[in-house]
Amino acid sequence: MGYKRVLTVQDISCFGQCSLTVALPILSACGVETCILPSAVLSTHTAGFSGFTFRDLTEDMPKILDHWAKEGISFDCIYTGYLGSITQIEYVKRMKSEFLRDGAKLIVDPAMGDNGKLYSIFDLSYAKEMAKLCAVADVIVPNITEACYMTGLEYRENYDEAYVDEVLHALDKMGAKTVVLTGISYTKDTTGVVVYENGTKQYYKHAKFEKGCHGTGDVYSSAFVGAYLRGNDLFESAKIAADYTYKCIANTYGDTTHWYGVKFETAIDYLTERLK
Ligand code: PXL
């Protein structure tokens, strides 16, 4: 497969182990050249902290893109996460048309909500625009909350396979042909990921911790993109990312002082070993 170059676009939460402070080290550990475009700089992430600062970097984006265009810079993959504004969604579309090499992929984690709610800075109009971006992406990595906000489907906490089929059908109708749907749990003790590709679906499940941890969506997506760029197929990449994320949670669980993120560094050796 050779040495790949990825651009990841998401925020810098200076404290809190999410978005770029997770994606950059994980992708680098996967052996992928990792370029970044910060969407915003926050003092902390927004889930559980109050009074955080938020520097929106929307205005810098076109200038950075203009410079890259002049330099002839291009990527094997663009992977987007938490964006700072609706305008940035438009800039990601520009990135797709100008900076992807032949055969390169746009992978979008819509990163805007969890547990049936949008994160504090987002609203329905953002979700609507995100749906349009997901419609033109090669692969999307939503959770059920994000899928529901994008498709207008009712969010359910408890569901069966028929409901997940409905979600996949709605995403397909929206234009998303390849979906890695995370956090799919049919029993109290298990959770997993559904990979939907060319109209068929595969499910990988593993043991579930009683409580969710913050930042696991970003850990999962980063490991998924890293494994995929290392030449694994979609389902194998989804499994590697699930097993890695599980270990990160296991290494954090029970430490009540570490409520804001997961200790993803403690399992990096497991991830690199899996990719050998
Ligand atoms: O992990 C998703 C995420 C990323 N960035 C910021 C966040 C969150 C989730 O709350 O607040 C700033």
Image: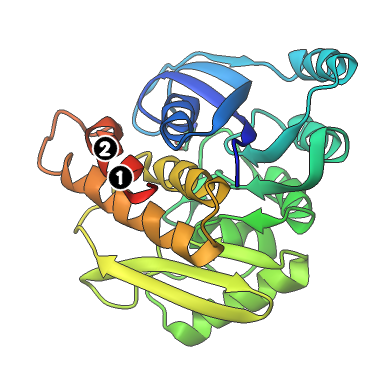
Q: Is residue 218 above or below residue 235?
A: above
Number of labels in the image equals 2
Q: In this view, does 144 lie above or below 84?
A: below
Q: Is residue 187 above or below residue 48?
A: below
SS for tag 1? Answer: helix
Give the image location of residue 226, x and y in percent: 50, 43
In percent of the image, x 44 and y 17: which residue is there?
52
Residue at image mark 1: 273
Residue at image mark 2: 269
* Contact (Cβ within 8 Å) of mark 1 with mark 2: yes
Q: Residue type at mark 2? A: Asp
Q: In which quarter of the image is residue 271?
A: top left
In percent of the image, x 16 and y 41: which residue is there?
251
Q: Is residue 22 above or below residue 146?
A: above
The numbered mark at residue 193 is none
Query: Residue pushed farthest left?
Result: 254
SS for tag 2? Answer: helix
Give the image location of residue 141, x and y in percent: 56, 55
Graded by Cα atoms within 10 Å as few (under 14), some (14 to 19) or many (20 or more), the crowding at tag 1 reads few
